Image (tube, grey):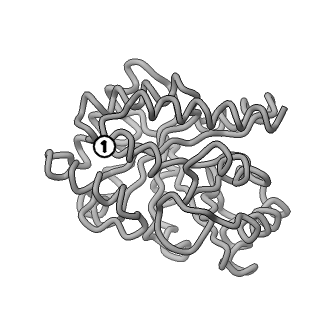
């Protein structure tokens, strides 16, 4: 069992919803990222999605785009992200998934990346610009190192595509709540909830809902059918504004709301 699988099993046993917090590596700087991971875990995060800065983050909205751009300007690179993970492992065993884009990873060499990521203490990858049909070789490379490669479903994913995704689902399935990019906004979670119900008939792999979640109320709504929620832009915005205490408070309030709703 991996750290990620252990965490979801622990959550299920405790009848709790998972809370995944996205943080951009290198924001506000190396030390600040380490502090943000520590803060997020202490405030109630179960899993960290560590953003690997890229010049053209097509799935991300303005806030994470800005964070990515600033991190690149400050010298953050993929090798440095792995160094960050090594430093995190000195004080935490929280599951960490590297969220990034395939161009960065292919430039590094994907097979080499999986070996180095495993050695650093990473638990897997989320790569939004790699479709299911093109992920086979990467899945094999990750599997060889005991890493997860998370796949996506959306409100528009066809039944056939859902079936194909479920056959190889690993770690968790990233359920994108709405078509478009990341960013806090009002969302009707009905369509993605219907997809999650369909997914759960075909796999026991946990489902995590992301995009648009920026408040405890939204998190509770998003978690209705899912096993976890993913919160990114709302937290990154506060960190960019040097409001780490407010970021911790927000994570804590979301944690409390999820726990209260389940109980």
Asked if residue 145 shows in the view, the reply is no
Residue 251 location, quadrant: top right
In the picture, which quadrant includes the N terminus? top right
Nearer the observer, 150 or 243: 243
* Image: 84 above or below 49: above
Residue 58 location, quadrant: bottom left
Q: Where is residue 109 in the image (x, y as percent from the top left)?
A: 28, 58
In the picture, which quadrant includes the C terminus? top right
Residue at 70% over, 36% down:
257
* Image: 168 above or below 118: below
Judged from the image, the secondary structure of the residue bearing numbered disc 1 is: helix
Residue at 65% over, 51% down:
218
Q: Is residue 216 left or right of residue 111?
A: right
As drawn, the residue found furthest toward the top would be: 91
Asked if residue 2 shows in the view, the reply is yes
* Image: 22 above or below 248: below
Q: Position of residue 228 (x, y in %)?
A: 67, 46
Q: Where is residue 236 in the image (x, y as percent from the top left)?
A: 39, 45
Tell me the crowding category of disc 1: few under 14, some 14 to 19, or many 20 or more residues within 10 angstroms, Cα based: some
Nearer the observer, 15 or 142: 15
Q: Is residue 157 left or right of residue 82?
A: right
Which residue is tagged 1? 240
Q: Position of residue 101 (x, y in %)?
A: 36, 63
């Amino acid at each position: 069992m991996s750290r990620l699988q252990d965490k979801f099993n622990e959550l299920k046993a405790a009848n709790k919803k998972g809370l995944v917090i996205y943080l951009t590596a290198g924001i506000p700087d190396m030390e600040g990222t380490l502090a943000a991971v520590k803060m997020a875990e202490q405030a109630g995060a179960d899993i960290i999605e560590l953003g690997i800065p890229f010049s053209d983050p097509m799935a991300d909205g303005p806030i994470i785009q800005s964070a990515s751009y600033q991190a690149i300007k400050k010298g953050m690179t993929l090798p440095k992200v792995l160094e960050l993970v090594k430093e995190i492992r000195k004080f935490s065993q929280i599951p960490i998934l590297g969220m990034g884009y395939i161009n960065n990873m292919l430039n590094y060499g994907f097979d080499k990346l999986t070996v180095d990521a495993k050695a650093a203490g990473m638990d897997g990858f989320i790569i939004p610009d790699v479709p299911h049909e093109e992920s086979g070789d990467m899945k094999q490379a990750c599997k060889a190192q005991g890493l997860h490669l998370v796949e996506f479903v959306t409100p528009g994913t066809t039944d056939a595509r859902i079936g194909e995704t479920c056959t190889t689902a690993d770690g968790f399935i990233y359920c994108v709540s709405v078509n478009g990019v990341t960013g806090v906004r009002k969302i009707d979670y009905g369509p993605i909830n219907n997809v999650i119900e369909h997914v759960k008939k075909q796999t026991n792999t946990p489902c995590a809902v992301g995009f648009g979640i920026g408040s405890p109320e939204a998190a509770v709504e998003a978690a209705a059918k899912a096993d976890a929620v993913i919160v990114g832009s709302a937290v990154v915005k506060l960190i960019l504004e040097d409001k780490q205490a407010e970021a911790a408070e927000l994570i804590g309030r979301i944690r409390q709301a999820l726990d209260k709703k389940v109980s």
